[in-house]
Amino acid sequence: MKKNIGFVNLDSSLLNWLLEKLASAPSEISNVHELSEALKDLGAANCSSLMIELNKDGAVASFPYDELQCGPLLINARARKVLRDNVEILLTPTEFDILYFLARNKGEVFTKEQIYKAVWEEDYFIDDSNIMAFIRKLRKKIEPSPDDPVYILTICGIGYKFNEKL
């Protein structure tokens, strides 16, 4: 399944308008609080981007967890922390974004271009070495054996996926 990934620039006036609309939204609408909190984090520069997944009917998909447990790897989205066997692994913001994007979409194969568009704000440049370098650095940090990865798998001729068996 191919993801349709788009970006919207959000200035402070649009952010304030969205927060006002969410504050007056009916309480029976799901995920309003989570979206408001994520937008506040974005406005406070606690994060640089916000990814919103829509269901097939166009509604915001539920996001019932802040943590992804993938075998001994624990990814905490809110704290932007990664632990393996309860030991914190320090990642750059971009490394975290790539890892979280792939782990959130376990088993789905993404091209380098799709990963780039999901993580960076600027237009995609035909430079596969950029993504490859980040994946290599990420593997050195999270994989027990970077030369024989178990988390981020290479799909020859296509791109990468996060191991769905974890």
Image: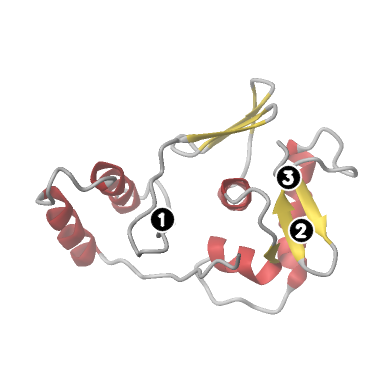
Q: Amino acid at mark 3?
A: Asn
Left or right of 147 on screen, residue 141: left
Q: State the CA–CA distance, disc 1 to disc 3.
A: 24 Å
Q: Give the residue at mark 1.
A: 50
Quadrant (top left, top right, bottom left, bottom right) of the C terminus:
top right
Viewer-nearest of labels 1 and 3?
A: 3
Q: CA distance from mark 2 to mark 3?
A: 19 Å
Dot 1, how many residues are within 10 Å of its Cα: few (below 14), some (14-19), or many (20+)? some
Q: On the rendered image, what quadrant is the N terminus found in?
A: bottom right
Helix, strand or loop for disc 3: loop
Q: Residue at x 15, y 62 (%)?
A: 17
Residue 73 position by quadrant: top right
Q: Mark 1 against mark 2, which lies toward the viewer?
A: 1
Secondary-structure class at tag 2: helix
**Residue 101 x %, y %:** 57, 52
Across and down, in percent, residue 113 comes to: 65, 71
The answer, for residue 49, to whether it is visible in the render is no
Residue type of the residue flagged with mark 2: Ala
Q: Which residue is mark 2?
A: 133
Residue drawn at (69%, 21%), measured in percent from left and top? 85
Upstream in the sequence, badge 1 or badge 3?
Answer: 1
Q: Are marks 1 and 2 in contact (CB under 8 Å)?
A: no
Residue 28 in the image: state x and y as whole percent.
17, 44
Q: Is residue 140 left or right of residue 6?
A: right
Return the residue at label 3.
Answer: 163
Lateral position of residue 43 relative to residue 166, left or right = left
